[in-house]
Image: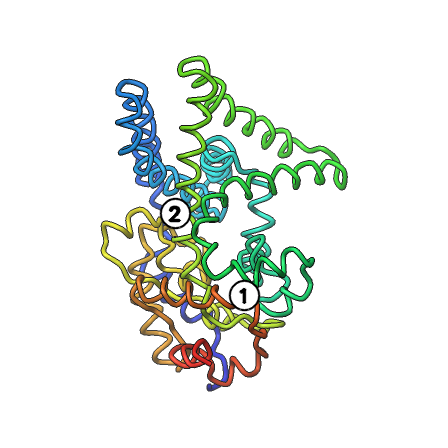
Amino acid sequence: MQAVPELGSLRQELRLAGVFDHREVRSWLKFALLVGGTAACLVAIWMFGWVAALALVPVCAVLCTAAAMMGHEGSHRSTSKSPSRNALMAYLAFPVLSGLSILYWREKHDRLHHGHPNVEGVDPDIRPFPFASTKGTHEKCGPKERWFQRYFQKWAFWPMSTLMALGMRRSSLVFLYNWRKRHRVTREWWMDVGALVAHYSIWLLIPSLIWGPLVAFLVYSSIWAGVGVFLALVFLPAHVGLPIVREQNKDWVHQLETTRNLEMPRFISYFFIGLDYQVEHHLFPKIPHQNIRKAAAITRSWCERHGIPYLSEPYHHALADAARFMANAWDRDASDPLHVRAGLVGHDHDAQLAA
């Protein structure tokens, strides 16, 4: 590959095209529509019982997943020019709606994942417990985890994705507990805790008074188990199946070597909140999702002019690729970043999977 060009020229093209302009009113309306749809599903379940629940729990899970991803935008400050309104979106969508600490999310996702995508031992998104994405990670696990990875990882990932939301909540509570021990208790910490109390009151306490504790718990657990599956469907194919490296290349091209866009119909893309355009999102996370399709056309053209890898695949191909990779990832060494830079990106990574 040629010398790495300055990313500033692409940023300037995108800025002139207006893709960094916020669409705040549209974002709030979309969030209200998703939350309103969730509430309507819950009311219908209350009115019509388990028959309605069978049909509406999956719908509710899709709506909750998309609404949570609006919080992802708020955390990246792409909802609004106003820092306070970005924070409001993040708090409403994550701790209040989803039961997930915003302090935990900013550490796990904004800092570690975005700063170090597909880097072994650093990026938490490629190490969903109890699975392993590389041989190095596998060898650091305890004997029970290694046994599980050898004999069950191949088929257990998707069934266990139903526990993803629960696992993230647990991790976020542990993070908040440890935060209090490591740092002084801040206003942000108290806001996080208060929002989490609101989450469990809205989702469990109040429904328990209406339905009884058992029914409330079953409805809540079913919805958020579905959210776990849909989160895996959103995040897994964006990075998994692409090179995992022992250390990262120190320039911005590393983001493109470890990220791909997902091509899908627009009606499905509506619920991805821009995360089907992971290339642009990783390069410029402040682009609002309403503008990211336009940004993708500009970015692809710019990359082609400069000989930069730009990965984009049909969604079902990327999903199948990720599933094949996870089946025996515990027995695969992480790549050398220079080897990846030399050309093991794009079509060549399929040969690695087949090896």
- Say which residue appears at 54% left-offset and 52% top-offset: 109
- Say which residue appears at 39% left-offset and 68% top-offset: 321
- Say which residue appears at 41% left-offset and 34% top-offset: 222
Write down the quadrant of residue 186 in the picture: top right
First in residue order: circle 2 vs circle 1: 1
* Neighbour tally class for label 1: few under 14, some 14-19, many 20 plus, Cα within 10 Å: many
Between marks 2 and 1 in the image, the one whose residue lies nearer the viewer: 2
Q: Which mark is residue 169?
A: none
Q: Which mark is residue 230?
A: 2
Is label 1 in a helix, a strand or a loop?
A: loop
**C-alpha distance separating marks 2 and 1:** 21 Å
Q: Nearer the viewer, residue 110 or 141?
A: 141
Kind of residue sitting beneath label 1: Asn
Q: Nearer the viewer, residue 280 or 127?
A: 127
| Image coords of residue 4 (percent x, y) | 49, 80
Q: Which residue is mark 1?
A: 118
> Residue 34 vs residue 251: left or right?
left
- Compared with 140, 213 (above or below) is above
| Image coords of residue 298 (percent x, y) | 32, 67
Residue that sits furthest to the top in the current view: 209
- Say which residue appears at 55% left-offset and 54% top-offset: 128
| Image coords of residue 257 (percent x, y) | 47, 73
How many marks overall?
2
Q: Nearer the viewer, residue 186 or 51?
A: 51
| Image coords of residue 197 (percent x, y) | 56, 25
- Compared with 317, 130 (above or below) is above
Kind of residue sitting beneath label 2: Phe
